[in-house]
Image (cartoon, rainbow, N blue to C red):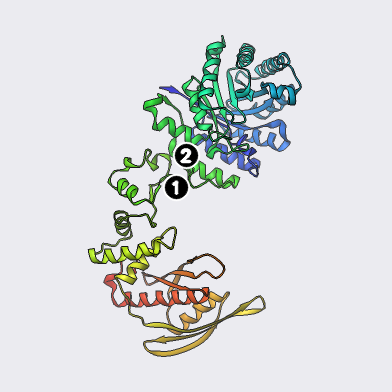
Amino acid sequence: MDRIIVFDTTLRDGEQSPGASMNAAEKLRLAVKLEKLGVDAIEAGFPAASPGDFEAVKMVASKIQKSEVVALARASKEDIDSAWGAIREAAHPRIHTFIATSDIHLEHKLKMTRDEVVKAAVEAVRYAKSLTDNVEFSAEDGSRSDRDFLCRIFEAVIEAGATTVNLPDTVGYAMPDEFGELVDYIRTHTPNLDKAVVSVHCHNDLGLATANTFAGLRAGARQVEVTINGIGERAGNTSLEEVVMGLYTRRDHLGLTSNIDTREIYPTSRLVSMVTGIVVQPNKAVVGANAFAHEAGIHQDGVLKHRMTYEIMEPETVGLASNRLVLGKHSGRHAFKKKLAELGYELEEADLNRVFERFKELADKRKEILDEDIEVLIAEEVLRVPDKYKLDYLNVVSGTMAVPTATVKLEIDGRITQGAGFGVGPIDATFNTIAKLTETRSKLVRFTINAISGGTDAQGEVTVRLQENGLVALGKGADPDIFTASAKAYVNGLNRLEYLKKNPSLALGERGL
């Protein structure tokens, strides 16, 4: 198979995403991760852009040992000197110089003729070549440039010493068929193109970056310029994970491969998202939260019978532990039964039917059902717990000028008792008072609140997980008043703990009710 050179520009073009600016330490951390991922070249930045970018590129160059470290420069001696100053200590340095070649850029931005652009490009490449043998030239806005002019300038820069020539679809304008034809035309009409690697750099303004990149590869390009999560200027760049997994999954069709360790894709994606603050959309290919999630009952049933029915990639291949069956209103009995088994429950058919019916009712109200929700349903429908404690009355006082205080009246084994207590907040005060009245010493290990409906008057649903002497019980309560819902959930959990103490055989290991 032909090996594709993966040129990652997350640290340079990716950083141009609005709000994604990185400091030197963050760039270095990402560069180390990219090297572990196995990218062939890391474009670390644009040293002439700022002193900070110069120092960041220099730090990356001093650290990275396996991947090439690339610095971007305009077609000027000053930019190239800055680029070389930043990467000269790199184990494998590359200077990447560029100039626009489309008539619209020549007329409105550069105010130059085609002859002047060719002269500037040749001089820039020749000067860069005097500093390093590894020089890349990019024809900015190449997809909107005259194809014969592209052949002319590529021939000239290769003659001047360029070892890689890059064809960018800078504004994401090209269609896959025409972009592939353009790459093919350049390859067949540039006499000395066999002396250089043809690269493609596509943007996603029309959502075609990955498709155009594959069209370029099919036409003979052998370097792809990509970013993690597809971040970059405007709508972003070609996504590394999409290209790499396309090569991996369809290697039978493409006959192409790369040096990427695909198991590092998801961890790298998470790191980029954390550093840049750009959240990965849930339906993003390969690395999105829903990429290996299944909710539809038909899909869940198929995946449980054989993964390949609805998964063309194994989640482990990209660094995920497993796929995810999302329980919701579209889920079927097969997926629900499997989830019960994962939680440690094997129910009789009648109990399963009853719990499944309650699950469907809950799923109509909630977008996603959590494990705790299922456990509560089982406790309510199968492991019915008699109430030792009942909440009769609750009054809470709290505010910026008041000490959080809760007054509680409980019925304990038919006997009424009441008391008051303090806490750091109203819910803490409520729980402290209930614990004092019930003389219990359980540990609150989880507390969650969900709104059952929308609006400020939504009914609140509280779930607590209580632990005592190795026993774990879940409590649940609902009320428009969130303090009351919390008290109900806490009392409900205490009742289940009491039941487990009397029936320890029902406790499923550390899970309990």
Q: Is residue 64 above or below residue 431?
A: above
**Mark 1 = which residue?**
290
Amino acid under disc 2: Ile
For the residues labelled 1 and 2, the Cα–Cα distance comes to 16 Å
Classify 10 Å Cα crowding around label 1: few (below 14), some (14-19), many (20 and above): some
Q: Is residue 411 above or below residue 369?
A: below
Q: Quadrant of the N terminus?
A: top left
The residue sitting at 38% across, 57% down in the picture is 329
Quadrant of residue 113 in the image? top right
| 1 and 2 marks in contact (CB < 8 Å) | no
Q: Nearer the viewer, residue 427 or 309?
A: 309
Q: Quadrant of the C terminus?
A: bottom left
Q: Is residue 448 above or below residue 405?
A: above
Q: Disc 1 vs disc 2: which is toward the camera?
A: 1
Query: Is 378 on the left or on the right of 170, as rendered?
Result: left
The residue sitting at 43% across, 58% down in the picture is 368
The residue sitting at 48% across, 25% down in the picture is 4
Element type at marker 2?
A: helix
Q: Position of residue 216 (x, y in %)?
A: 51, 23
Amino acid under disc 1: Asn
Q: Earlier in the sequence, mark 1 or mark 2?
A: 2
Q: Position of residue 296 (x, y in %)?
A: 37, 50
**Mark 2 = which residue?**
265
Query: Is 116 on the left or on the right of 170, as rendered?
Result: right
